[in-house]
Amino acid sequence: MKNKLLGSNDPVLEANIQFHTALSKQYDGSQPYFSDPINTERVSQILGDLAAQAGNDGLLDIGCGTGFICALAQSIFKQVVGLDATPAMLSLVKPCANIHLILGDARHVPYPDASFNVCTANGVLHHMEDLETVAREICRILKPGGMFYSDEDPNHDYFDFFDTLDSGNPELSGLMHNEHNNLTNKAREMKEQFNVDEEITQLAEYQKMVKGGMKTHAMQQIFLNAGFSEVQVEYRWYLGQASIRKQLGREGEKIINDYLYASLPLSSRLFKYFKIVATKATT
């Protein structure tokens, strides 16, 4: 595989390097959340809140990719460090005086204990196999009371439902058919668009395609075991939310989101993603 990380013999990591190298030049355009001003405003607000709570001296962005989080964080934090395993992605991060980039593995961050106030991982954890080791490393590099934020983590309840869905059921709506097709054809589409082998895509999307998504309670336990004292999970992006926003506006979108939240855990299968905010113990 190309751009092999020095000393790596990890097939999941190597699949990610090949996968993201192939996507790198078109990556930003393929990520709708990057160009969505509503999402940019939401994430910027989250980063500001984290800085206010944990301090703004330093932020580490794991799996920084082309620099979505780095670009938002550079005006909030004094120092921003972006870490990624793919050289082609790092080469596309917009330079800034207080942004430092590192080619590396999230399981071995080249910084001493308690180096950062905040650590982020936006749409990244599902690419990794060994989440326990990553969680411990994140906890290690955070200062006491430091905070971790991840987003766009694939919800197992949602992906498991579509994995087992009978697509031939005549009662299925067009919405359900379309989403089932989008999920089941992802690897094939990557092959057609970027010439990435389907097996590489599946390994690169390990927690999503191999494990069928990430279980919220299991993720909470992983971070608690790693040394975090509090782990909050918030479900995100319900089925059809983009269409609801177009039809009913942000107010209508929020009304439905609030209703689904009030219906948890019954409605958990309707949310495609979740986010995590974890706080490291102070002692």
Image (cartoon, rainbow, N blue to C red):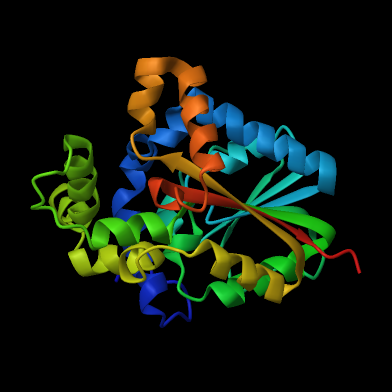
- Describe residue 74's horizontal placement relative to residue 186 as left or right: right
Res. 257 in view = yes
- Describe residue 191's horizontal placement relative to residue 121 as left or right: left
Which image quarter is the C terminus in?
bottom right
Which image quarter is the N terminus in?
bottom left
Q: Residue 107's image quarter?
A: bottom right
Q: Residue 237's image quarter?
A: top left
Classify 104 as above or below 11.
Answer: above
Classify 31 as above or below 122.
Answer: above
Residue positioned 37% across, 25% down in the render = 244
Res. 3 in view = no
Q: Position of residue 265 (x, y in %)?
A: 51, 53
Classify 55 as above or below 196.
Answer: above
Q: Position of residue 78 (x, y in %)?
A: 79, 41
- Describe residue 275's horizontal placement relative to residue 33 as left or right: right
Instruction: Identify the residue at the far right of this view.
Output: 283
Count the numbered circles shown: 0
Q: Nearer the viewer, residue 60 or 127?
A: 127
Q: Nearer the viewer, residue 161 or 106?
A: 161
Residue positioned 48% across, 65% down in the render = 215
Residue positioned 55% across, 33% down in the render = 258
Q: Position of residue 149 (x, y in %)?
A: 64, 51
Residue positioned 37% across, 64% down in the render = 16
Q: Position of residue 158 (x, y in %)?
A: 37, 54
- Describe residue 170's horizontal placement relative to residue 56 as left or right: left
